[in-house]
Image: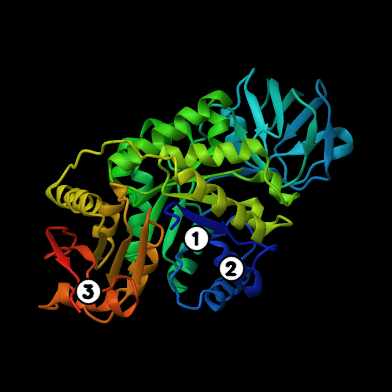
Amino acid sequence: MRRTKIVVTVGPASWNPTTLERMLREGADAFRINFSHANASVWKRIVEAIREADKDCSCPIIGDLQGPVVRLGKLRDLKVSKGDRVILKLAGQGDASKFEVPLPEPLAFENLRTSDVVLIESGRVALRVEEVGAEHAICTALIDGVIRGGKTFAIKGRDLPLPSLVGRDIEAVKFAVNEGLDYIALSFVRGGRDVEKLRQLLRDLGASDIRIIAKIETRSSVENLEEILEVADAVLVARGDLAIYFDLEEVPLVQRRIVRMARERGRPAIVATQLLDSMVNNPLPTRSEVVDVYTAVKDGADALMLTNETAIGKYPVESVMWLSRIITRAEMEAGYELDIKPRTLYEAVAKAAVMMSDLLSAKIIAYSERGSTARRIAVYRPRQEVHVFTSNPRARRQMNLFWGVKSHLCSFSKRDPRLFESLITAAKERGLVSYGDIVVLTAGAREGATDIVRVERVAD
């Protein structure tokens, strides 16, 4: 059984129920909607298609906010060569014939400095700033490329002081709440305060049970990672944007650090961006992409995310198939040697349950009302199967993003006086265990707790 989860971005290449069903069969565990594109009516059709394809409603849906990103204005494709003179102008529309590129954000010009390197579309085009004015900047192209309207603008190595939640994001959050999405990914997080602002908005909207994924994609977010991990429910390693703030050769080390710190603090970590990028146009991954996936699995990522491969690529189903295949092989060698020290009593109990499971070669059968017990168990990477029951449909979906966890919906709750007997009965009915099997049972007596462990042999 594959343990590392697969998150699939849904876009024009995959938003029909037939393709979604095929991706589910190949191993998709969660779906992502990128709120940077399209509008609420399109997002709603995507949600409906996902729910039509996901017959047992087990897959979480992640809404990914655009965040405070700066984009170019309207521009006909402009091909530039190294050494070309390019003018950035404070305008909504540019003139490609004059090499004038529109940048409708005054704050960008306020923060530009001579010798800064400007990255367009995450570095597909790089410009060096030669001269800066209040409403223009004269630049020199550092590489050959094509500048396209609407693409992202960034200053290498530096954050722009933009608000963490912009108007479009707030509307997207309201959409996510109304449509019952399970996670919201917050873009360009700089510190714990950004996460808390989104958390408060969710509370105000009566949706505090929607979980927050903090996207680690700026220098500030890496520097403030510890405080972010204290308030976020999960983190996402956004490698494309990290390359704006760190040299390319540093990105693998940053990825490893983020994943390690997330595991140490009991937070799931998702690795994203260009995992199988060649499969946007080709039916097979490259050898280097296979190695990249191996590395992410060995680093201990809880989930890997496909982006363009499944959103706009020619081979969305094949991309899921290959990612699942590579992960499965990589997990045979992974080891997960990181020794995580429990920080609380509940984490210690979860680790003890995993250790007993490994020692006895026993499956773990747990009950988790909101997912805390499942999350704690996943941190310690049990070798045996983990089946977690809950009466909470949203928590059931959210738990399916956790490493190695298979979640199940049940009719009983933790207040059942015969909880463990009910767990064994439910597991037997689903064919998860059979007569004579040894199982490790665990749950929490109080909300958010993991404080009961029992070992039993399944009776007839």
Q: Position of residue 129 (x, y in %)?
A: 68, 22
- Label 2 vs label 3, nearer the camera: 3
Q: Nearer the viewer, mark 3 or mark 1?
A: 3
**Would you identify the image quadrant in which residue 428 lies?**
bottom left
Residue 167 image offset from top left, x and y in percent: 51, 57
Kindly state the secondary structure of the residue where label 1 is placed. Answer: strand
Residue neighbourhood size for the residue with mark 1, other residues' Cα within 10 Å, grouped as few (<14), some (14–19), many (≥20): many
Q: Amino acid at mark 2?
A: Trp
Mark 2 packing: few (<14 Cα in 10 Å), some, or many (20+)? many
- Residue 424: numbered disc: 3
- In the rendered view, does 126 fall on the left or right side of 372? right
- Name the residue that disc number 2 marks: 43
Q: Which of the 4 image quadrants contains residue 200?
A: bottom left
Indicate the amino acid at tag 3.
Ile
How far, Cα to Cα, is label 2 from label 3?
A: 40 Å
> On the image, numbered disc 1 is attached to which residue?
63
Q: Quadrant of the C terminus?
A: bottom left
- Please name the residue shown 21% across and 54% down the image: 360
> Is residue 305 toward the left or the right of residue 405 in the image?
right
Residue 66 visible, this angle: no
